[in-house]
Image (tube, grey):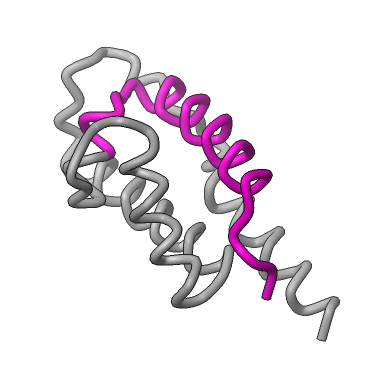
Amino acid sequence: MSKWSSQIEEELTLLIKDWLKQQGRTQADLRRSLQAVSTRMPALLEVLEREHRLGGMPRVAERLCEVEAKWAETNSSPSENATNADPFNQLDLLLQEIRDDCGSQA
């Protein structure tokens, strides 16, 4: 399992910002879902870093997939962009890619 690094933080930040935009969500929405202490990116990443310590990137991806599923279930987005959500479920694809990578390293 790779260690948490500034590179991981940078990549996750870009992924999260793009994902939120595509979902029509805000960092405040993610803060509520992750139960983070703040809407600022460092606080969101802190929660994801804890998840990483518990199970690496697969755990982080699973947590974000759970958030996405919850949002889809409630579909209470304040933005109309939620109806234009990515039909390819990028987080599910990311999780599968991570699982494939972990399996090939074994």
- Residue 82 x, y percent position in the rendering: 32, 23
Name above or below for residue 78 compared with residue 75: above
72 sits left or right of 63 in the view: left
Rendered-image quadrant of the N terminus:
bottom right
Question: Toward which corner of the image does residue 101 lie, by quadrant?
Answer: bottom right
Q: Nearer the viewer, residue 25 or 69?
A: 25
Q: Residue at x 67, y 70 (%)?
A: 99
Q: Residue at x 62, y 45 (%)?
A: 6
Q: Nearer the viewer, residue 84 or 46?
A: 46
Magenta-drawn stretch contains 22: yes
Name above or below for residue 43 compared with residue 27: below
Q: Residue at x 63, y 39 (%)?
A: 11
- Residue 74 x, y percent position in the rendering: 16, 42
Give the extent of the magenta segment. Answer: 1-30
28 sits left or right of 87 in the view: left
Chief secondary structure of the magenta portion: helix
- Residue 34 x, y percent position in the rendering: 25, 51
